[in-house]
């Protein structure tokens, strides 16, 4: 075995439309959405840890943007001297 398994599932048209819409809102394929949903129910994905990591990344990006703005301001002020 290659270490991977493929599973086939059936959804009604309306169920799959809801899945496609939710996946599209997240910018991921429907298959990834279904896979993540299955893994979530097994506890394999720790969404609390994922959320904390994403918050940390967001905060780091904000700090870097603020630092970049400050650096540009200082550079501009030095050019005026």
Image (cartoon, rainbow, N blue to C red):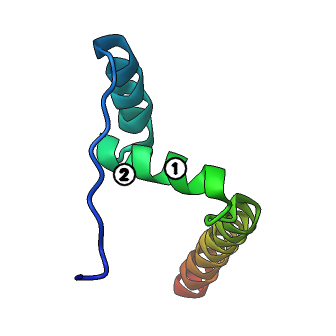
Compute the Cα span from label 2 to label 1. Answer: 10 Å
Asked if one can make out residue 58 in the rendered structure from this viewpoint, the answer is yes
At horizontal 67% and vertical 74% (from top left) the residue drawn is 60
Position of residue 56 relative to residue 77, above or below, is above
Q: Position of residue 67 (x, y in %)?
A: 66, 78
Mark 1 burial class by Cα count in 10 Å: few <14, some 14-19, many 20+: few
Q: Nearer the viewer, residue 80 or 58?
A: 58
At horizontal 70% and vertical 60% (from top left) the residue drawn is 51
Looking at the rendered image, the quarter that the C terminus falls into is bottom right
Position of residue 46 relative to residue 24, above or below, is below
Q: Nearer the viewer, residue 65 or 74?
A: 65
Mark 2 burial class by Cα count in 10 Å: few <14, some 14-19, many 20+: few
Q: For mark 2, what is the residue?
A: 32
Q: Along the horizontal axis of the image, is 72 left or right of 18? A: right
At horizontal 55% and vertical 57% (from top left) the residue drawn is 39
Q: For mark 1, what is the residue?
A: 38
Label 2, secondary structure: give it.
helix
Looking at the rendered image, the quarter that the N terminus falls into is bottom left
Residue 53's disc is none
Q: Position of residue 33 (x, y in %)?
A: 42, 45
Callouts 2 and 1 close, C-beta under 8 Å: no
Question: Mark 2 or mark 1: which comes first in sequence?
Answer: 2
């Amino acid at each position: 075995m290659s270490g991977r398994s493929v599973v086939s599932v059936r959804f009604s048209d309306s169920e799959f439309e809801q899945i496609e819409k939710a996946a599209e809102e997240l910018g991921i394929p429907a298959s990834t959405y279904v896979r993540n949903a299955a893994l979530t129910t097994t506890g394999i994905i720790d969404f609390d840890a994922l959320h904390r990591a994403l918050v940390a990344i967001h905060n780091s990006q904000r700090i870097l943007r603020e630092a970049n703005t400050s650096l540009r301001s200082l550079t501009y002020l030095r050019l005026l001297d």
